[in-house]
Amino acid sequence: MFKFENSAWFYALLLLPLFIWFFRASMQWQRNASAKLGQNALISRLMPDFSAQKRRTKFLLYLFAYCFIITGLANPQVGAKLEKVKRQGIDVMIAIDVSNSMLAEDIQPNRLERAKQLVSRIIDNMKDDRIGLIVFAGNAYLQMPLSSDYAAAKLFLKTINPDIVPTQGTAIAAAIELSQSAFSDESKTHNALVIISDGENHEADAVETAKKAAAEGLVIYTLGIGSPEGVRVPVVVNGRTADYKRDNSGNYVVSKLNESILQDVASSGNGKYLRIAGAKDEVASVLAALDTLQKRTFEDHVITDYADQFQYFIAIALILLLIEFFTSERKSARWAGWNLFENEPQK
């Protein structure tokens, strides 16, 4: 496991363009000042050993040293100790609908992004539970297996979009079946499935599948996202809305929240249906529902200690600064013609 202890230091790298601009401006000012003193040939004879390229090289060394210092201050850390710990919680699979209808913007910024924000906040409030991620549209796919690594869960969550599934649709039954296989066989009575969807199910077996899963101990919660009135479904190209989805007759397709199917699935799964509409207590409601499940004790492997790596980056920065210190600005034949910053001919 690799992480940065103080990642906020990387904001200091935003100063790099300013440093480069300042250096180029100072070089230009120097050339202009020299031009006022006399012709270039005369200036070259007065300062025969000065090398503008060597000055650029020294500046590059400064830049690289600065980057390594900032990285060192951010303190890269590598997991150094893996321990087996006992936790008391539940296993939760979260299935997120990624069909194109989830791009509808009746919930801002759109249904899918709102669902991801909700899941992210749920993860932030978890402690000893394990979480897994499923995405589904025309079929269901395991995005992340059960884990107590909440940071990894949030990383996987960010990658979710409609393009990661090959076929469209809303296969709720497939998501339920996949979640059952994703849970361990140790216990079937401490598992929960949270389905987040607009309910536009195109299969008739979702309720029956939920009943079978509930008979085996799985509790299913459904979160409806969208508006019953519905809105048009945008066609997104390169991150922008290019048009709106149309049917074969050329009419706009209107996507509506289908609460009835989600309510039936939750009821058949011995769970609860909640509607996501932007309320502040949505996360609390979901966590309260999950908290009613009986918790169990399970073993997990977690990293309990990290080894600092900042010293290596600081050492490299010091070496670069030493090289810069012993690099003179006198001309050297091997540097001739090498110019990273500008295209003016060497004098």
Image (cartoon, rainbow, N blue to C red):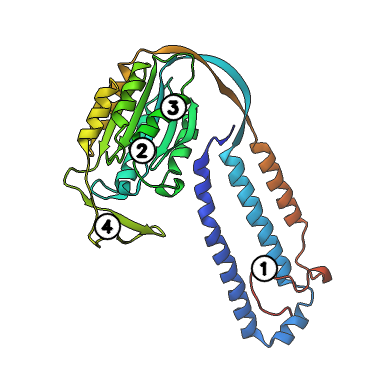
Q: Amino acid at mark 1?
A: Leu
Per the image, the residue denoted by label 2 is 171
Which quarter of the rendered picture does the C terminus lie within? bottom right
Residue with the most extreme right position: 333
203 on left or right of 62: left
**Mark 3 neighbour density, 10 Å: few (under 14) some (14–19) many (20 or more):** many
53 and 170: which one is in front? 170
Q: Residue at x 43, y 43 (%)?
A: 160
Q: Residue 109, position in %: x, y?
A: 29, 49
Q: Amino acid at mark 2?
A: Ala
Q: Earlier in the sequence, mark 2 or mark 3?
A: 3
Foreground tag (1 vs 2): 2
Q: Residue 117, position in %: x, y?
A: 34, 39
Marks 2 & 4, CB-CB < 8 Å contact? no
171 on left or right of 184: left
Q: Residue 271, position in %: x, y?
A: 28, 22
**Mark 4 neighbour density, 10 Å: few (under 14) some (14–19) many (20 or more):** few
Above or below, 242 relative to 120: below
Res 281 seen here: no
In three-dimensional space, the C-alpha distance between marks 2 and 3, rounded to whole angstroms, equals 21 Å
Per the image, the residue denoted by label 3 is 131
Q: Secondary structure at mark 3?
A: strand
User: Based on the displayed image, in which of its 4 quarters is residue 46 positioned?
Assistant: bottom right
